[in-house]
Image (cartoon, helix red, strand yellow):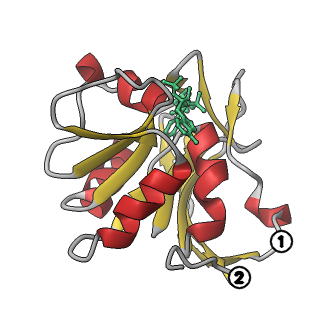
Amino acid sequence: MDIIVAVTSDWAIGKDGSLLYSIPDDMRFFREKTKGAAVVMGRATLESFPGGRPLKDRRNIVLTKNASYKKDGVEIVHSTEEAIELIRGERERPVFIIGGDSIYRQFLPYCSLAYITKMDITLPADSFFPNLDSEPGWALEEEGPVLEHENIKYRFTTYKNIDVRSVNK
Ligand SMILES: NC(=O)c1ccc[n+]([C@@H]2O[C@H](COP(=O)([O-])OP(=O)(O)OC[C@H]3O[C@@H](n4cnc5c(N)ncnc54)[C@H](OP(=O)(O)O)[C@@H]3O)[C@@H](O)[C@H]2O)c1
């Protein structure tokens, strides 16, 4: 499974339950990459989507501790172990961890690649992604050209986990 995330210069990803900044080209990249995939997210990330609705054309797997939480079009799990059980059984689709902060940290060791859109901007934030430049086992694999949107420079990068943990027992 892989991770997909957009970070600012200090690896920030969100504030008050919302994204910090959104670049149309990056949104397109996210849609194309995850279309048809299984996406794993925390309850707060699901609720940050328009209308709190799941993503279309994807298998939506959502973590919550709330035993009575229900949402149409969503598979609810209550622990990382339960999520891993579903991921292990997923034979047809690729699996993407799509956030937020808490979910990225819990699933990072199991991910092979991290697709990271780096935006050259600093904004007030309360959610962060681990800085992969100082995370043991992770190495920068690919770095795209510098692009620009509304005077903000950004680039698509890929990091590789050289010590990936298998979800299989
Ligand atoms: N920049 C990006 O690419 C990106 C992508 C995604 C999200 N974000 C941002 O990230 C922020 C949200 O991150 P977050 O950490 O606050 O929320 P989150 O990870 O989306 O969701 C947290 C919730 O997930 C549930 N959860 C987490 N671990 C669990 C476990 N082991 N077992 C069962 N349930 C578990 C809990 O739900 P309950 O409270 O219901 O128990 C927890 O409160 C927002 O600002 C969002 O916009 C940014």
Q: Give the labeled residue for mark 1.
A: 136
Q: Quadrant of residue 101?
A: top right
Residue 19 appearing in the image: yes
Seen from the viewer's position, the closer of residues 54 and 67 is 67
- In the picture of the structure, the residue carrying the numbered disc 2 is 163
- Quadrant in which ligand 1 is drawn: top right
Front-most of 78 and 72? 78
Residue at the (52%, 55%) spot, across then down: 81
Q: Which residue appears at 26% of the width and 77% of the height? A: 91
Q: Are marks 2 and 1 in contact (CB under 8 Å)?
A: yes
Quadrant of the snapshot with the C terminus = bottom right
Q: CA distance from mark 2 to mark 1?
A: 9 Å
Q: Is residue 44 left or right of residue 20?
A: left
Camera-side residue: 131 or 78?
78
- Against 156, is 13 above or below? above
Q: Residue 19 placed where, x, y %?
A: 50, 28
Sequence order check, earlier mark of 2 and 1: 1
Residue 166 image position (x, y, % from top left): 56, 79
